[in-house]
Image (tube, rainbow, N blue to C red):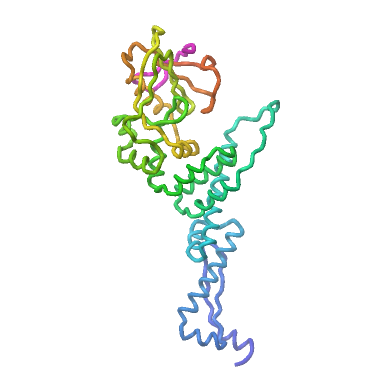
Amino acid sequence: MTGENSKSEEALRLSARVGEAAGAELVVGTGLADLINRLRPKRVLRVQGREVIAGAVLRRLAAGEADDADLEYAKHVFGRQEARWLRRQQIEDRAVAVLERKYAALPAPDANSNAVEDKEIGPDWFEKFWDDAELVSDEVVQEIYAHVLAREVMAPGSSSMSALRVLRYMDPAVGQQFGDAIRIRAAFGEPDWLPNDDALMERFGITYTMILRFDDAGLLDSSAAVVRKFVQAAIVFVRYGVWVVALSRRDGEPFDVQWPIYLLGRGGRDLARVAEVERNIDDFFVVSRWLRSKLRGPEEFDVRWAEMRHAGYSGEASSLMWHDLPLDDPRPDEDAVQAP
């Protein structure tokens, strides 16, 4: 029993599959090294099995056909640098999906408008971003990193280094809770804020413990002393996504008002901008009625709302269609009125 025939006759074969990858064969030969390895059959099969599975996973990665199970296995088997590279690919894929959604939602460009000057993303920003992002395996935080990356690609310089520092040390659970909390963020201009009202926050499932966690993460200021004050104002506008509410006295007299708020920090504002958080008109009405409740003699005020063309709208208030704020029923009234 000599030569290739004898070897093939005595060879031990093992088939293995990885996910839906094609079958791969392991061959344990009968050479000296193979005979020695037969003393430790589990070891040699385990080593060769890893090689076969890793090879199948690599082929799927190269073909862009890897699933989550392949990626998890690759992170476990390969070295640290390879695992960082795989996480980078995951985040880049998520960022591409974000860009595709954002581009689909953009209005058609104006052929007569001037071209926007191209800007480059600074190499320092990219280096800092990937230093942190390549360490992230949690899907929630990966999604946040993907949104930050997509935003920076679309508008270089829009995501600060402080936001990257916040992301680096943020607990995934805190990130998820913050995403829920910013459903009710609003703005008088800049920066954004959350209402500081226990009953209102409880309605949206936000506890003071969460607020303290957001503060620890550098997302907002939990101080109870922070208020937004207006003195001798003729009218106050408060923005909420694509909607805006206007508050003014019916007799046209100026008024004073202050609202207790939790002010978002720079990192919190950056995360709030990039997060795709669903915002709806019913939540807007709830926040608007809270604003009204803090007025002195609220029945003496006109409180009206309008929908803007987009969240970044900067046109005249008179170009919007205004409606009376529903005080009980969140459904808007049917008759539009002139600008306040």
Q: Residue at x 56, y 42 (%)?
A: 150
Considering the whole magenta stretch, tell me its main secondary structure: loop
Q: Position of residue 61 (x, y in %)?
A: 58, 59
Is 173 drawn above or below residue 235 in the view shown? below
Residue 333 part of the magenta-drawn span: yes
Q: Position of residue 338 (x, y in %)?
A: 49, 11
Is 1 drawn above or below residue 287 in the view shown? below
Q: Nearer the viewer, residue 18 or 232?
A: 232
- In the rendered image, the residue lying farthest to the left is 199
Instruction: Give the magenta part as a residue range.
Output: 324-340
Q: Nearer the viewer, residue 123 or 284?
A: 123
Q: Nearer the viewer, residue 326 or 183?
A: 183
Q: Position of residue 35 (x, y in %)?
A: 52, 87
Is 134 drawn above or below residue 188 in the view shown? below
In what quadrant of the picture does the N terminus appear?
A: bottom right
Number of dots carrying numbers: 0
Q: Position of residue 239 (x, y in %)?
A: 46, 25
Q: In the rendered view, does 207 fall on the left or right side of 64?
A: left
Q: Residue at x 45, y 79 (%)?
A: 42
- In the rendered image, the residue lying farthest to the bottom is 1
Residue 194 position by quadrant = top left
Is 183 drawn above or below residue 174 in the view shown? above
- In the rendered image, the residue lying farthest to the top is 251
Residue 222 part of the magenta-drawn span: no
Residue 34 position by quadrant = bottom right
